[in-house]
Image (cartoon, rainbow, N blue to C red):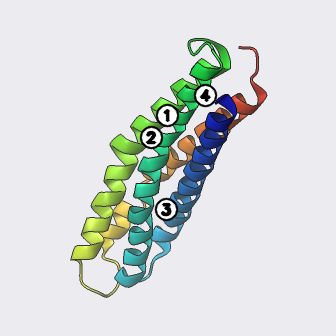
Amino acid sequence: MYEELKVLHVLAVVLLGGTITVDTLAGVLMPRARSMAELRAFTRMSKTNQYLGWASILLVPLFGYGAAADADLELGSGWLLWGQVLFWVAVVISQAVLTPGALRLARKAESLPDGPVPDEVMRELRNPVFPALGGLLTIFFVVIVYLMVAKPDL
């Protein structure tokens, strides 16, 4: 059963990586939007992507913990502990800050008329907190993948 759960865990991680890629792309493109129609397209892409993100946030630990239990791995030490800590910190940051911000922006974009992007919205799009946190979460993802593959002695 371990092999099957590990394959499902890896597939869920690939899904998570895809959602990170789409959100990064949308985040880079949104401040470059010249019109509300463009901005709405990018916010819809990000909003739709949230469903896959939530699924991967549930599936990665479900299959990961299942595989670890089947293999009798010690969850409380070393690379496995640090992978979990980084994963759950990333989940909290994404779900407490980034996802609400993206959904708020999507609602605002849907409510505004066509035309150029208003200055107020452009200021929000250029808020450095969101790209900084997104970059941090991308680094977390890479470190977690390294920990899970290399299994270093920590």
Chain-order first, disc 3 or disc 2: 3
**Residue type, numbered disc 2:** Leu
Q: CA distance from mark 4 to mark 3?
A: 34 Å
Image quadrant where residue 37 sits: bottom left
Give the mark nearest the N terminus, 4 or 3. Answer: 3
- The residue under the point 49% across, 46% down is 56
The residue beneath circle 1 is: 62
Distance (Cα) linking label 4 and label 2? 14 Å
Residue under circle 3?
Answer: 27
Report the residue that reaches farthest toward the front: 1
Q: Is residue 80 above or below residue 35?
A: above
Disc on the earlier residue, 1 or 3:
3
Q: CA distance from mark 3 to mark 2?
A: 23 Å
* Residue on which the image places disc 4: 67
Snapshot quadrant of residue 74? top right
Q: Please report whichever mark, 4 or 1, sits nearer to the chain's N-terminal start.
A: 1
Q: CA distance from mark 4 to mark 1?
A: 9 Å
Residue drawn at the location 55% of the way across and 28% of the way down:
66
**Left/right of residue 80 with respect to residue 97 in the rendered view:** right
- Residue 3 x %, y %: 69, 33
